[in-house]
Amino acid sequence: MCQVLEYAEPGSGVPSGILLRRQSVKKGEMLFGAEQLFKAVYAVKSGSFKAMVPDLNRQERVVGFYLPGDLIGIEGMANQHYSYSVRALEAGSVCVLDIGRLTESGRSTEAIQRALIDMLGREVALNHSQTASLIRQNADQRLAAFILALALRTSLRGLGGDRLYLGMSRSDMASYLGLARETVSRVLTRFQKEGLIRLRNQSLMLLSWDGLRQVAASR
Amino acid sequence: MCQVLEYAEPGSGVPSGILLRRQSVKKGEMLFGAEQLFKAVYAVKSGSFKAMVPDLNRQERVVGFYLPGDLIGIEGMANQHYSYSVRALEAGSVCVLDIGRLTESGRSTEAIQRALIDMLGREVALNHSQTASLIRQNADQRLAAFILALALRTSLRGLGGDRLYLGMSRSDMASYLGLARETVSRVLTRFQKEGLIRLRNQSLMLLSWDGLRQVAASR
DNA sequence: AACTTTCGTTGATCTATGTCAATTTGTATG
DNA sequence: CATACAAATTGACATAGATCAACGAAAGTT
């Protein structure tokens, strides 16, 4: 996922035109706003973030969450501006990859471009499958799949995958999954009654990985 | 959208490693299957195509449609294999860009890579906004937006945008929009009664561009 | 042209989930 | 600590759209 990072890691021959710096963010702080000019790509080091698009008449809609290890903002490279806003759900830190000038100059390394193509391609493929699944699934399936995806992502990053910290509110989840926040609440408490998860405040404990998988695949 | 094509157009200095050829396809013919090894990118010259992902328990799900001018399969470049199947909705023709070897060799032109990055980036951004909107919209909004998007795409390609040929079946639309085919049918006939569209067989006539826009934006 | 099969339309129900409303819990602020 | 404010839960109710079913219209096949 972070091949660009590896190429740009200090001491390993940073390509010219790339600036790498660390930055800490407070809870609720905005990384960048939609329509803002593209300046950098961010790699999440710690904390979590949400991406939102401004909904026409209504309030903003959540289109994604980012966890440590994720890259934020790559697709801004194409349009010269970001297509969504990103806000920190909790205190954390990011690595800022200042590659805005890379595309301007045209002078760039093959390796980085290849890495970008790979990442973008993967994101497109992922999006396709996610879009497809979200639309046709009922509330139970969406939430089960959501929890599983979160758990998988955190476990891939090293931390034990069955203890999750949910930085986002129920409304954020609801917005992301296309449900009412009341429905999210109801389904989560039912999952708890059924022994699939254990839920206290912001922390979620995965009790039955398989049970959730069954729910997600059912119908 | 087709910058790569311009670079690769015969007689204009085709970069080495790229093979360009024309190919005609019959109705129902498959361009490539999901999980198949990535070989080429296709540019639609005439006709229309649908992309499908194999749904686990259920039948295949439609994740997109391609019209003349669209590029098919770019995101396969990342994973080395396609992430969906593509089938022709009617007889047509495509330009095959045999750039599979381009990524292998590593020897490639900056221009093409930049073009690829741009296209992929645009696709990611588009996908985000589409996903976000589809989930929260009701049947009327989805269909109105769908028709408008189709009309816009065809009008951008030159042909008068208010006469559409719907190559896909109601089931295809339904699958793509996450609705039952009965609902698609009902909504379309209601749109017709309300004077928004005129519908006969496979051809759709846009009577009130603005009316549809209102429906799509409402709620 | 006759047949078969697929596709589209329309009607009658049923159900999942949105909406409204009230209460409780959690979190920030003085 | 007390107060105020935002988020979460729970219940009652309404409804958009799925599902089931029947039928009519195209389209492909012999």
Image (tube, coloured by chain):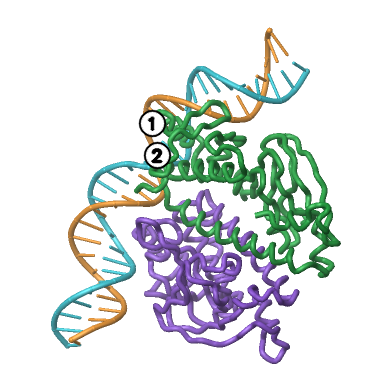
Chain colours: A purple, B green, C orange, D cyan
Please state which of residues A24 and B69 is positioned toward the viewer in this rendering: B69
Q: Quadrant of residue D25?
A: top right
Residue positioned 48% across, 32% down in the render:
B185
Q: Amino acid at mark 1?
A: Glu
In the image, is B24 to the left or to the right of A163?
A: right
Q: Which mark is residue B194?
A: 1
Instruction: Tell me the chain of label 1.
Output: B
Are the residues tagged 2 and 1 within 8 Å (C-beta)?
A: yes
B170 versus A176 height, above or below: above
Task: Pick whichever, B48 or A148, lies toward us.
Answer: B48
Number of numbered discs visible in the structure rendering: 2
**Quarter of image, res A128:** bottom right
| Marked residue nearer the N-terminal end (2 or 1) | 1
Residue A205 image offset from top left, x and y in percent: 47, 73
Left-right relation of B14 to B1: right
Crowding near the residue tagged with mark 1, few <14, some 14–19, many ≥20 C-alpha atoms within 10 Å: few
Q: Give the class, few, some or many, for how many residues have Cα within 10 Å of label 2's Cα (few <14, many ≥20).
A: some
Q: Could you tell whether A129 is left or right of C9 in the image?
A: right
x and y, in percent, of residue A70 in the image: 57, 74
Q: Quadrant of residue B29?
A: top right
Q: What's the distance in space between the residues labelled 2 and 1, CA to CA?
A: 9 Å
Q: Chain of mark 2?
A: B
Secondary structure beneath label 1: loop
Q: Position of residue B141 (x, y in %)?
A: 43, 44
Question: Which residue is pictured at 59% across the width and 60% down the height?
Answer: B122
Q: What residue did someone put label 2 on?
A: B211
Q: State whether residue A194 appears in this view.
A: no
- Residue type marked 2: Gly
Query: Quick one: B9 or C1, which is closer to the camera?
Result: B9
Up-down relation of residue B34 to residue B143 (above or below): below
Q: Is residue B130 left or right of residue A111?
A: left
The kind of secondary structure element at disc 2 is helix
